[in-house]
């Protein structure tokens, strides 16, 4: 259980079983990390990161434009596809920014 769970009364003492369970879980996670020899995900290579950025730059605008086209057809309007295309470009730029900010 989380320390700051919204429905947990901070005035009540913590159950000893929960404390023991938390301690056993921490020990098991530490033992598994030692056994596996990894502490986190492996860093991405430059090529993998480049392909991820390329797929984001292509798929986000095309997917949004497709959704806009479907909305245009169903609603009988014009121009929503173009607006969705630009929203897709904006979302792609945001995602590329987040990818670039992660340290390798």
Image (cartoon, rainbow, N blue to C red):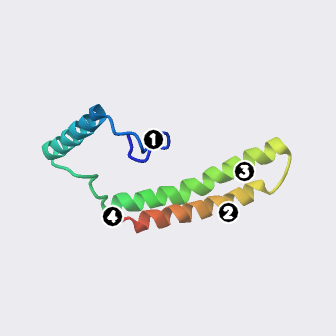
Q: Residue furthest right?
A: 76
Mark 2–mark 1 CB contact (< 8 Å): no
User: Which quadrant is home to the N terminus?
Assistant: top left
Label 2 vs 4, first from the N-terminus: 4
Disc 1 element: loop
Spatial CA distance of label 3 from label 4 is 33 Å
The residue indicated by pointer 4 is: 46
Q: Nearer the viewer, mark 1 or mark 3?
A: 1
On screen, residue 79 above or below 75: below
Q: Residues within 10 Å of mark 4 (few under 14, many from 20)?
A: few
Mark 2–mark 3 CB contact (< 8 Å): no
Q: Residues within 10 Å of mark 2 (few under 14, many from 20)?
A: some
Going 73% across and 60% down the picture, which residue do you hit? 83
User: Which quadrant is home to the C terminus?
Assistant: bottom left
Spatial CA distance of label 2 from label 4 is 28 Å
Disc 3 element: helix
Label 2 vs 1, first from the N-terminus: 1
Residue 68 tag number: 3
Spatial CA distance of label 1 from label 3 is 48 Å
Mark 2–mark 4 CB contact (< 8 Å): no
The residue indicated by pointer 2 is: 86
């Amino acid at each position: 259980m989380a320390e700051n769970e919204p429905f947990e009364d901070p005035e009540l003492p913590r159950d000893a079983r929960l404390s023991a369970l938390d301690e056993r879980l921490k020990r098991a996670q530490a033992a598994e990390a030692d056994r596996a020899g990894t502490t986190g995900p492996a860093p991405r290579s430059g090529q993998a990161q480049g392909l991820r950025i390329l797929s984001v730059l292509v798929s986000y605008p095309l997917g949004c434009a497709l959704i806009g086209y479907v909305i245009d057809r169903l609603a009988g309007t014009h121009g929503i596809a173009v607006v969705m295309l630009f929203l897709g470009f904006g979302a792609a730029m945001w995602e590329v920014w987040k990818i670039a900010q992660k340290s390798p």
